[in-house]
Amino acid sequence: MTGSEASPTFRLAYVPGVTPAKWVRIWNERLPDIPLNLLAVPAAEASDVLRAGDADVGLVRLPVDRTFFSAIPLYTETTVVVVPKDHVITAADEVTVEDLAEEVVFHPLDDVFDWDRPPGEPAFERPATTEDAVELVAAGVGLLVVPQSLARLHHRKDLTYRPLVDAPESGVALAWPEGATTDLVEDFIGIVRGRTANSSRGRKAPAPEPKGRADGRTGDTAGARRKPAAGRTAGNATGKTAGKSTARNPRAGSDVSKGAKRRKPRRRA
């Protein structure tokens, strides 16, 4: 890398209510040399941020345009209704949309639900944000329906919430432009899906080198067996045979055969 080239970074956009801390921690453990930059974006703007290339991936709310984005659904949130702590609804463990029929329910402009018809009585005007709507609930002028993570995000001591069992639900997904699936994107996908650092899925691992066959007949010369030279085999065999013959007749000369008879010495006259 030359001095003029920027170090690689990875950019993660995320919408309100989503907590990416666990995945960020794992990224920093596995890829400490590649900084992960976080970008908080409103839910309605997440797709535009990804289309513009201002983030590599995003933790967004469904639905997304599947003709442009690849998306991996992660989880679906419980829908809750936010109420003052002294509201009559707090007497129940859970409520239905019908229970809200006579209540003023705020429908902020950044609402993440795709309602056919919002529950309850409409407010005089729509708050600009969910945070603004929470302030109005605290003032006792209406209620608010949100995913549970947003109720926790905007928690106040004077407010509480109850599950709304028959309302639409909000799904959270990991999304990125389909044509921009880089190696770093694959790394983050593996982290989100819970793969281990040594998992073979995700990035394509290099092809393994061919292993030698048991009979040594592959192109791997290191594993192949070499046949001994003919002369070496013959020499070894001859040497062993000769050695054995000499050992059995130590007093015989090298030209004495094994079966020859010894002559008596002549006497002198």
Image: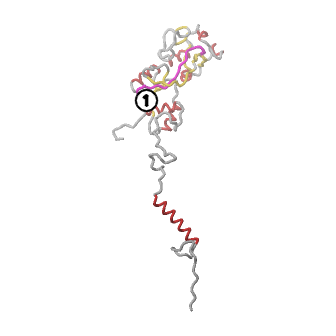
252 up-or-down from 71: above or below: below
Q: Which residue is mark 1?
A: 181
**x, y percent for residue 66:** 45, 20
Q: Is disc 1 surrounded by few (<14), some (14 to 19) or many (20+) residues within 10 Å? A: some
Residue most extreme to the bottom: 269
Q: What are the residue bounds of the magenta stretch?
A: 164-179
Question: Which residue occupies the foreground of this view, 21 or 31?
Answer: 31
Image quadrant in which the C terminus is located? bottom right
Q: Is residue 51 rendered to the left or right of residue 144?
A: left
**x, y percent for residue 95:** 62, 14
182 up-or-down from 228: above or below: above
The residue located at (43%, 22%) in the rendering is 47
In the rendered image, residue 256 lying in the magenta stretch gets the answer no
**x, y percent for residue 199:** 52, 36
Question: Which residue occupies the foreground of this view, 263 or 143?
Answer: 263
The secondary structure type at the circle numbered 1 is: loop
